[in-house]
Amino acid sequence: MKNILDHNRKAWNRQVEKGNQWSIPVSHDDIEKARGGDWNVVLTPWIPVPREWFGDITGKDILCLASAGGQQVPIFAAAGANVTSFDLSDKQLEQDKKVARHERLNIIYQQGDMRDISVFDDESFDIIFHPVSNCFIPDVNPVWKESYRVLRKGGVLLAGFANPLLYLFDESDPGKPFKLEIINKIPYSDVELLDEQMKKLYEDKGYPFEFGHTLDDLIGGQLKSGFSIEGFYEDRHHDKGNPLHEMINVFIATRAVKK
């Protein structure tokens, strides 16, 4: 487990160096608009999260869980929330810090595994913002259980994740054309199914290991942890190199409430 974490931390640090789209900080204009109440963020690739999913975030305690990269975190802070950024990648956290320093935003930072947020007390947050990132851990259930624990009653978990069907197909080598040929079972694990040559390629190229989870864990796991799911939508990635994205929405966003 430690090796997976260490690999993915280093891989996401490499992704920051490469200019991955999820590591490019928001602009000064975006921050100024957020200060004036004009803002939006995404849990999935494109569709903005409905503002009614948040309510008024002024003075609210928000945990951005595996959400660093200089994007959502500073927007929430500029909009008036008390924000904590929790992420495995030190360079993704640094992207948040750069914006905060430049824009004079108060943000708390914590580095660690999204499955272990024991550093936070029970009922510490009003909102948890968790965009597509649990595809980088083998088991999502600890995320839901810990999120439920640290949310206050009436608190909201906003989560984005990949539909497991995305992992049915062979996309093990991002450098090769995608083929619509089912070869994998769900749950899926890069760690278990990649051969040693491909794992070495992932290390050399800075690709993180990914995991495809069942809907029973992704949605059922939230319900089993005690949440009530009160919002749902689908989204897709406009990736012309992957025909699957032209045929079906492969990302899901949920709004779950701690009653």
Image (tube, grey):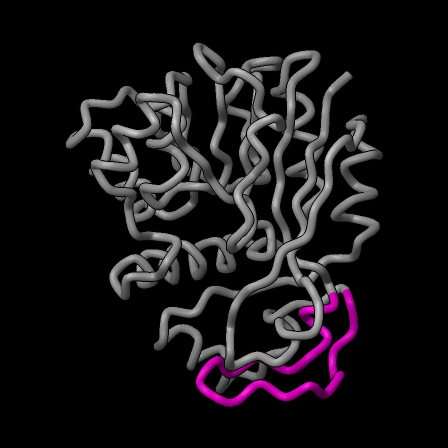
Q: Residue at x 55, y 14 (%)?
A: 124
Q: Quadrant of the C terminus?
A: top right
Q: Is residue 170 left or right of residue 3?
A: right
Please determine whether, in this image, residue 115 is positioned above or below residue 209. above
Please determine whether, in this image, residue 147 is positioned above or below residue 244. above
Q: Quadrant of the N terminus?
A: bottom right
State whether the magenta stretch is mostly helix, strand or loop.
Answer: loop
Please determine whether, in this image, residue 193 is positioned above or below residue 251. below
Depth check: 37 or 125 in front? 37
Which quadrant holds residue 225? top right
Depth check: 87 or 169 in front? 169
Q: Residue at x 63, y 88 (%)?
A: 179
The percent coordinates of residue 62 (x first, y second) are 49, 22
Q: Is residue 49 left or right of residue 230?
A: left
The reply to whether residue 237 is visible in this rendering is yes
Q: Residue at x 24, y 42 (%)?
A: 27
Asked whether residue 141 is drawn in magenta, I would say no
Q: Report the magenta residues as a range.
A: 165-186
Asked whether residue 184 is drawn in magenta, I would say yes
The percent coordinates of residue 193 (x first, y second) are 65, 77
Q: Residue at x 54, y 30 (%)?
A: 117
The percent coordinates of residue 65 (x first, y second) are 51, 36
The reply to whether residue 139 is visible in this rendering is no
Which quadrant holds residue 9? bottom left
